[in-house]
Image (tube, helix red, strand yellow):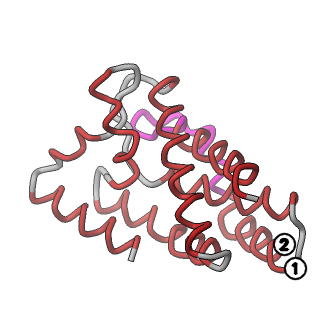
Amino acid sequence: LFIALLWVIHFVNVLLRYRLNILGVYPRRVSGLIGIPCFSFLHGSFNHLFFNSIPLIVLINFMLLSGMQKFIHVTATIILISGAMLWLCGRRAIHIGASCLVMGYFGYLLINAYQHPSLLTIIFALVSLYYFGGLLGGFFLSQEKVSWEGHIFGFLAGLAAVYLFS
């Protein structure tokens, strides 16, 4: 349902000619504060949303195996912490996309397996690392339209979520 929500929002955004993207995080501007809870639900293109949806499907399912309440708490934590960090430290641009969530779930699953080793957490971490380990390269992207800060801050927010909700 979460992925479906992202797609519905994107279709509405397309119909509005991407005008909703103004609700992204714009660092160090008061008007950019509205983006903190909104930015993860907005995308710049179908391609952008598609390539966020693939890892989200897997990672969300791994997260949901810990329960809906934990999923909601971790998701809200990742969105709010990474959004706040983007607002404080991001480069001057509108930051949008669920990449922060992808990286946050990825970081959460890896560190949770280290902090609370069990057969299940280790399997989730290994599968995540095997299939999505290339996401770590997102920390070093130099493309102008890619929010590498969002990748890093999402990962850090996922680490924080481990300590807040373990």
Q: Position of residue 24 (x, y in %)?
A: 32, 40
Q: Are marks 1 and 2 in contact (CB under 8 Å)?
A: yes
- Could you tell me which secondary element the residue under label 1 belongs to? helix
Highlighted magenta segment, given as a residue range? 134-149
Which residue appears at 87% of the width and 59% of the height?
A: 114
Which residue is identified by label 1? Answer: 119
Q: Nearer the viewer, residue 74 or 87?
A: 74
**Based on the displayed image, in which of its 4 quarters is residue 94 positioned?**
top left
- Does residue 137 lie above or below 92 as drawn? below
Position of 23 with respect to 101 (left or right) is left
Which residue appears at 52% of the width and 55% of the height?
A: 101
Q: Is residue 147 magenta?
A: yes
Q: Nearer the viewer, residue 162 or 144?
A: 162
Q: Give the spatial CA distance, label 1 vs label 2.
A: 5 Å
Instruction: Find the residue positioned furthest to the left.
Output: 16
- Could you tell me which secondary element the residue under label 2 belongs to? helix
At label 2, the amino acid type is Ile
Q: Nearer the viewer, residue 105 or 138?
A: 105
At label 1, the amino acid type is Leu
